[in-house]
Amino acid sequence: TLDLALNNFSGEIFSSVGEMKMLELLSLWGNGGLNGTLPLSLFELSNLRMLYLDGNNFTGSISQDIGQLTMLKQLTISDNPITGVIPSTLGLCKELELLLIDNTDIQGTI
């Protein structure tokens, strides 16, 4: 578990995040100043079950690599200026129970 929510952090997610292979929960919500695109290494966290990214300033789109997070149960990415379409590979996340993408520019169907 890595819970860094509500700390007023700024900048990008460090690319070495993918090295934390046993990580099951990553919570970065509510920092406001986190920005940039989501690093591809984030999608290498094969044990990740909960990913909370809402309330920041992430841009770009959600990578098709999200399908590698097959254990993912909860994904919250609301309140970010993320664009693009919902990746079709999100369907590979068979355990997904909660998806919050409101107040983004993400489009498409699930």
Image (cartoon, helix red, strand yellow):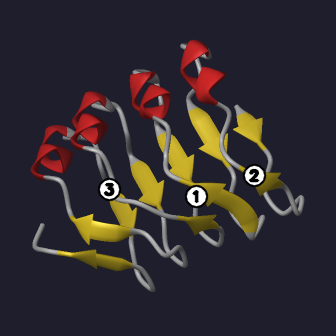
Tell me if residue 8 comes above or below residue 109 in the rendering: above
Given residues 75 and 85, the one toward you in this image is: 85
Q: Does residue 101 appear left or right of residue 19 in this picture? A: left
Q: Amino acid at mark 3?
A: Glu
- The residue carrying mark 3 is 97
Write down the residue under mark 1: 53
Q: Nearer the viewer, mark 1 or mark 2?
A: 2
The amino acid type found where label 2 is placed reads Gly
Pointer 1 with pointer 2, Cβ within 8 A? no
Q: Nearer the viewer, mark 3 or mark 1?
A: 1
In the rendered image, which quarter contains the N terminus?
top right
Q: Nearer the viewer, residue 50 or 77?
A: 77
Q: Earlier in the sequence, mark 3 or mark 2?
A: 2
Q: Taking 61 as reference, is 14 above or below it?
A: above
* Residue located beneath label 2 in the image: 11
- Measuring from the top left, give residue 18's x and y in whole percent: 54, 21
Please provide percent x and percent y for residue 11: 75, 52
Q: Which sits earlier in the primary sequence, circle 1 or circle 2?
A: 2
Q: Reading the chain from its start, which is encountered first: label 3 or label 1?
A: 1
Quadrant of residue 52 within the rendered picture: bottom right
Q: What residue appears at the point 29 percent right and 49 percent down from the top-left corner?
A: 96
Which one is nearer the viewer's eye here, 64 or 69?
Answer: 64
Q: At label 1, which amino acid type do we have?
A: Leu
The residue shown at (62%, 16%) is: 20
Residue that appears at 56% across and 29% down: 24
Q: Nearer the viewer, residue 101 or 74?
A: 101
Residue at screen point 10% across, 51% down: 88
Q: Residues within 10 Å of mark 1 (few under 14, many from 20)?
A: many
15 over 54 or under it: above or below: above
